[in-house]
Amino acid sequence: MSEEKKKSKETAGKKTGKKLDRRDFLQGLATVPALGVFGYALKKDMDFKKNQKQAKLGKPAPASKLSELNVALLGVGAQGEVLLNAMLKIPNLRFRAVCDIWTEYNQKKTVRMLKKYKYDVNGYEDYREMLDKEKDLDAVIIATPDFWHSQHAVDCMKAGINVYSEKEMSNTLEGAKKMVETARETGKLLQIGHQRRSHPRYIHCYEHLLQEAKMLGRIVTVNGQWNRAAAPDLGFPKRYAMPADRLKKYGFKSMEQFRNWRWYKGLGGGPIVDLGSHQIDIYNWYLNARPKSVMASGGTDYYSKSTHEWYDTVLAIYEYETEEGVARAYYKTQTTNSSQGYFENFMGDQGTLVLSESEAGNSGSVYRETSAPPWDEWVRKGYVTAPKVIMPGSEPNVVLDVRETISPDEHKVPVQLLDPYHKPHLENFFNTIRGTEKLNCPAEIGYETAVTVLKVNEAIEARRTLDFDPDEFEV
Amino acid sequence: MKDEKFNNLQMIALTIMRVVIGWHFLYEGIAKLMKPNWSAAGFLLQAKGIFAGIFKWMAGTPDVLAVVNQMNIWGLIAVGLGLMLGCFTRLSSLAGILLILLYYVCNPLFVGYYYSIPMEGNYMIVNKNLVELTALFVIMVTNSGKYAGFDLFIHKLLKK
């Protein structure tokens, strides 16, 4: 003890003036290994951050030179405008024609705008005239009311043009079936506008979180919703009203009906089709299954039944038979309150995934059940962010019951889409024409979703559970 | 200073503390260096208390802010390396103390100020900044760099 103490005193202080020996040398460098450990940790830390960043930005676009495509727009109302704004951000498209029966307003506005962008576009009222006169079109973008989709798409494909058709594919299954058959017969491409199928976040979650990592375990329940605020009917400037005979020629009774076609039977499908179809499409995709049955409740509870033939409020419950077992999924859409917006929520025995198309809310969160295997590997790979641990005691006055399960840690899905929502899906369509990609939502998938969703309206009317025949989904 | 008072174990403990604090400084500096657009402006703008005016002036004057940013980043890295390697330990400790003091007075935890109550833990006047500052004071006066660090060489070579 005393020996050691003496020694330590020596080493601690009494070195001044002595020569540097080996011991001094080692002691002087004693803390250098700590810097080595620091360097190693820093490297790991940087790799992790790089992975997270890469996941956020997605794959870089291929630098190859793209051929120019001639594009026509068929239907340039509100949705057509959304698609056009996305397309204006896609390089190597040449807009050639704009067709819209509302020549006084929609058509005039879009032609004028495209001319400002230096495109030499022709305006048409009747799509048949456009198909006759425009001979070198590569693609047509259809954003007309649902009841026109089938005829428009079929005639365009028969004219040798590839088609991007807004969803719902058609308001009837016969119409939708004809579209699938025509796509097969003509060999033309038909992309249906379920744009989440091309959304980098949705693809990331499906490929990495569900297929590869199986982070949710067995998915047992699914729910989703689209809550939309009450809104007045769409109006129109009186001086731009269409003459009655033109309205009649294209299947509308009045300007009011033309503007609000989504609410009318025989024209649209109501909110369950306009909104629900986007999200129920994700149920089928993520569960790798088609539903076995559906029950639903709905009605025109808020608006006037004379102008809102389709249901303003719908609750639907599906039963799925997935590879792992039964899964039940419910969906709600209502058009009287926008609180909590829209999302899809998948719940498995190991985790929960909540996501939506929006960057503003529900932009992708994953919650790990405390009993699930660790997710460190997926965090390291950048599939999800490091968890935000919810600290106990942040609510000082809450007394937790010991029997309560601790709420799971929240991980974020790091993938963002800073472009217009429809841009990736349109790009996928154009790149498939160029032969560099495959359609993310070909006619067959659009058909499956149409079968799944249109049955909800049937079930509401029938007031009972309706079964799906597995053959129903095939054409 | 009477170095004789410390035995080996005590010196090892002081060395570990020095390396750990150095690590923290070094990483704070490097993390800021790595963030492409890092700036102290956000931190300075939320300054509270008696010196708030000065800090906000710093944030609002681009030339001053640029200097503050660079000095902060490289100051943290230099102090971190100095402490970890035990090189100019006393000078590094003093510089570290001054830096932390600036952070502390920028957001002082004086009683009655409840704006900066942190997410974790409970603080009253004393926060982690102050604890680290005090630890640096101990390092400064005990000079463990002369025990295990480059200061050992410097000291010996100068004394020769």
Image (cartoon, coloured by chain):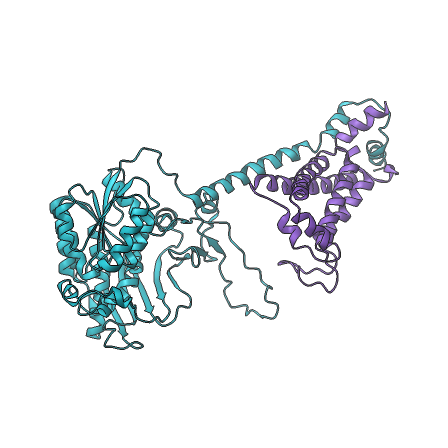
> How far across and down, in percent of the image, does residue A381 sit?
45, 43
| Quarter occupied by residue A259 | bottom left
Q: Nearer the viewer, residue B130 or B156?
A: B130
Q: Nearer the viewer, residue A179 or A389?
A: A179
Question: The chain shown in cyan is which?
Answer: A
| Quarter occupied by residue B66 | top right
Locate residue A426 relative to residue A186 in the image: left or right: right
Question: Residue at position x 20%, y 74% from top?
Answer: A461
Q: Is residue A345 above or below residue A161?
A: below
Q: Does residue B94 appear in this view?
A: yes
Question: The chain shown in purple is which?
Answer: B
Q: Is residue B96 above or below residue B146?
A: below
Q: Nearer the viewer, residue A81 or B78?
A: A81
Quadrant placement of the N terminus of chain A: top right
Locate residue A378 relative to residue A123 in the image: left or right: right
Question: Residue at position x 44%, y 56% from top?
Answer: A365
Locate residue B46 relative to residue B144 in the image: left or right: left
